[in-house]
Image: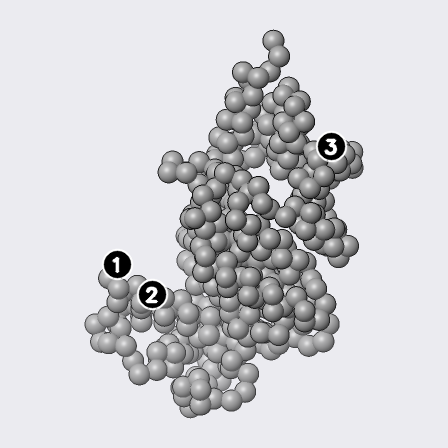
Amino acid sequence: MTDLDRWSTDLLRQLAPQVLGAVVRRYGHFDLAEDATQEALLAAATRWPADGLPDDPKAWLIRVAARRLTDLLRAEQARRRREDKVARWALPEDWLAPAADRTGPAADDTLILLYMCCHPSLSPASQIALTLRAVGGLSTAEIARAFLVPEATMTRRITRAKQTVKDSGLPFALPTGEARTERLGAVLHVLYLVFNEGYVGTSGSSLQRTDLADEAIRLVRIVHRLLPGDGEATGLLALMLLTDARSAARTGPDGSLVPMAEQDRGRWDAAKIAEGVALITAALPRGDTGPYQLQAAIAAVHDEAPTAGETDWEDIAGLYGLLLRIADNPVVRLNHAVALAMAEGPEAGLALLDALDAENLLGRDHRLHAARAHLLEMTGDVKGAHEAYLTAARLTANFQQQRYLHAKAAALDDEAPA
């Protein structure tokens, strides 16, 4: 791929949700508008390299997509005896003007599209798939590969999601009041899930899927740009940047997992760390502090420690304590237990892990057993640690995690009493 091709591809990905949002806002018909927009993008990818970039690429795409949508609507409405009505539709002239010359809600189209993709009637899996398809611009095949499902399965999931949005009669507009806050929460949660799947794949042979993590960061940047005053949108962007900054050091040359304590911190991305720290530093003093901001603050403490041994675990344990007050869930409790163990000794953390185990909240989650193995190893309980590492390895579907956990268990074999 040449630099020109790469630049053109990046531009199309940037414009895709804006064009789709504009067409849906004018005509409705989310499912057909998405097809029409994809055809417009394909036409641009074919014609722009030969004809040159139009003066206003976004207007060009909207015009082509609108014409294609009109064709699709004519065909559909003809079957319902309404072709003459659709044929009279025309694209208003103001839609062909540069974005800077327009007024009204056009600037919110991408955000509205995100709200639609995260419709409360959709399952989280469908919200993720539709967001990556409609806003991220990923093909169905790319999304299927990312989540390790057959393309046909993902096609059905996306089709059902679009039909659900269509049947809901949801207007193309920003929700208001409490609904707007709730839907923004859903949008941020979906982007958080996409990033997590990219940072640590739940299954497969690779530890990371950088394309998904990068896409999540790109999308949350859009939300932050549109809602710069929202502390949680800022916090989520900071969290992603501070976490993703460590990506290059998380795997060895053979793709194997490298735990944070053993990573070469010289390979961490200093620019992302600086941006993330600046974002969370600015966000924390403003208004109420939410869970993404606290998680970003925790990530900042990790990233700013010169060495693993200089990590301020007391500060991290305290931040997790605050997080438990506003977002108590098993994973936060697990992380709090590990932080407390590092700050006060492994016994303190093991007591909290035992309480989690007793409530059977994470019994089938490999992270609970991996954490217990690590803390048992710290206490000198070689046999218990060995068993816990093997249990954790059985419960994860990610090959690199399995590989790491088996290696930890094998390293303890020589230390186990005869």
Image spot of residue 168 (x, y percent): 63, 68
Query: Are the residues tagged 1 and 2 within 8 Å (C-beta)?
Result: yes
Taking the image as shown, residue 389 lies to the left or right of residue 214, namely right
Q: Residue at x 77, y 54 (%)?
A: 325
Q: Answer yes or no: is residue 216 visible.
A: no
| Secondary-structure class at tag 2 | helix
Q: Residue at x 47, y 70 (%)?
A: 17
Q: Residue at x 26, y 67 (%)?
A: 4
Label 2, label 3: how far apart the Cα atoms are: 53 Å
Taking the image as shown, residue 327 lies to the left or right of residue 34, namely right
Q: Dot 1 corresponds to which residue?
A: 1
Q: Residue at x 47, y 37 (%)?
A: 257
Q: Nearer the viewer, mark 3 or mark 1?
A: 3
Which of the image's four quarters has the C terminus? top right
Q: Of 21 and 75, which appears nearest the observer? A: 21
Q: Amino acid at mark 3?
A: Glu
Image spot of residue 253 (x, y percent): 37, 38
Which of the image's four quarters has the N terminus? bottom left
* Residue count near mark 3 (Cα–Cα under 10 Å), binned few <14, some 14–19, many ≥20: some
Compare marks 2 and 3 and give the one earlier in the sequence.
2
Which residue is most to the top? 418
Tell me which corner region of the image, top left, top right, bottom left or bottom right, holds residue 384.
top right
Taking the image as shown, residue 259 lies to the left or right of residue 96, namely right
Q: Dot 3 corresponds to which residue?
A: 347
Q: Nearer the viewer, mark 2 or mark 3?
A: 3
Taking the image as shown, residue 68 lies to the left or right of residue 121, namely left
| Secondary-structure class at tag 1 | loop
Q: Amino acid at mark 2?
A: Thr
Q: Of 21 and 362, which appears nearest the observer? A: 362
Label 1, label 2: how far apart the Cα atoms are: 10 Å
Q: Dot 2 corresponds to which residue?
A: 9
